[in-house]
Amino acid sequence: MGAGRAQSVCMVSDFFYPNMGGVESHIYQLSQCLIERGHKVLVVTHAYGSRKGIRYLTNGLKVYYLPLKVMYNQSTATTLFHSLPLLRYIFVRERVTIVHAHSSFSAMAHDALFHAKTMGLRTVFTDHSLFGFADVSSVLTNKLLTVSLCDTNHIICVSYTSKENTVLRAALDPRIVSVIPNAVDPTDFTPDPSRRDDSTITIVVVSRLVYRKGIDLLSGIIPELCQKYPELHFLVGGEGPKRIVLEEVRERYQLHDRVRLLGALEHQDVRDVLVQGHIFLNTSLTEAFCMAIVEAASCGLQVVSTRVGGIPEVLPENLIILCEPSVKSLCDGLEKAIARLRSGKLPSPESIHNKVKTFYTWRNVAERTEKVYERVADEVVLPMDERLDRLMSHCGPVTGYIFALFAVLNFLFLLFLRWMTPDSIIDVAIDATGPNGAWTKQYFGGKRGRIREEPPSSKSAQMERKKAPNPRGFEAC
């Protein structure tokens, strides 16, 4: 049990299991640790295929998969108002005290923040990305972020570079922005030197194959180094539109036996790929934190990475070789790592793992997030008149007045919903979280419009828990 007051926390994002990635892993691991510290935690996301309604993951973590339309890249379409009935019902039913939204890319996260403020709930937002200031998409995203965060109680960023970026993009007071890094479960990423072939040198790349991850740089590095080092092999995990570029390089230079493209990887399979390598290469053009290099270092690999975003903050200098985002600089960095490997000057995988596992732990992330919740719980929620003043003064003469009007309409819609279905007649959900939590043993949904909840004792619910990420537990919480 944490030292602070127990909160009922609702994590909201378009990105969650079964979709796998850094944001999804962050939400899941943080939720598990907060549950172990005595808080009630639930996750709200959109439906993934047939995965709709309410499901349970490890330790009774309840996930609401809402039937909202996906617009682009797993992010939902939004009219701002259409999600209020569902989110309001969940917030009331679960007696939510803090709404914690994740990712600037998530429309559902912004909707949840907007509705939570209308309902008088405390709000926290975690930004996982870096954005520019010049192109049209960045300008529009930054303006939306300004509207969402101007009256949000607290903001969390995953690195100091990310904090600086978010403060500038959303014109925030730095005092309401905290830095809490990502973490890695060291029990999931342990070295296994017996899995790698020391007669060759294997460079591992695990990344989405998109422009932002620098795959064009990788396509220039592969032929140059393969020509210079006959024993060099590349192992590439990930999928994306830039895969065709790597396939063309492999075909042009006849490197089929030295460049393996593994395609999309499940998160539980990443470690099995990493332990086959000696060097991990990250070619990203922008990163707020980069969990991949922490996972690779935890598996005992020497890391070579571009010096962009928050990456220089992640690992100490003796565990990473930083390069400029260019083919020449990255080739020089890889040659330096190869020379160290050949001379036996690299530390053993076990020693690297033992260092990395002390740097970032989900226990520490949960403790620091809990302090943010304690601070937020003591803050006064802005009344509607002050919220309107904040929107109009902070977001510009046009955008501010437009969203102030939206806030008024949202409040009127909320009053209508409360008249149609008063809070007092909405069922209170049974808390099923934690090792000692009471599993729900009844159906909700007898009345029209209610959310139907599947009892965790059912066969399908048991199968869901078996398929949940990290089913055997999590780090050291």
Image (tube, rainbow, N blue to C red):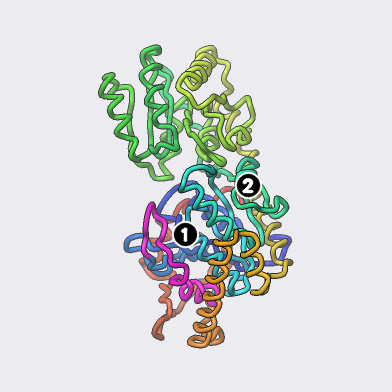
Eyeballing the image, is 471 above or below 409? above
- Magenta stretch: includes residue 337: no
Residue 35, which numbered label? none
Foreground disc of the pair 2, 1: 2
Which secondary structure lies at badge 2?
helix
In the image, the segment drawn in magenta is 69-93
Is disc 2 in contact with disc 1, using a CB cutoff of under 8 Å? no
Eyeballing the image, is 89 above or below 184? below
Q: Residues within 10 Å of mark 1 (few under 14, many from 20)?
A: many
**Residue at x 28% of width, y 27% of height:** 248
Which residue is at the far front? 397
Please provide percent x and percent y for residue 85.
47, 76
Please provide percent x and percent y for residue 399.
55, 61
Which secondary structure lies at badge 1?
helix
**Residue at x 41% of width, y 34% of height:** 273
- Magenta stretch: includes residue 74: yes
Viewport quadrant of the N terminus = bottom right
- What's the amino acid at mark 1? Ala
- What's the amino acid at mark 2? Leu
Residue 107, which numbered label? 1
Q: Residues within 10 Å of mark 2 (few under 14, many from 20)?
A: some
Residue 168, which numbered label? 2
In-front residue for pair 259/418: 418
What number of labels is visible?
2
**Residue at x 50% of width, y 76% of height:** 89
Occupied quadrant, residue 211:
top left
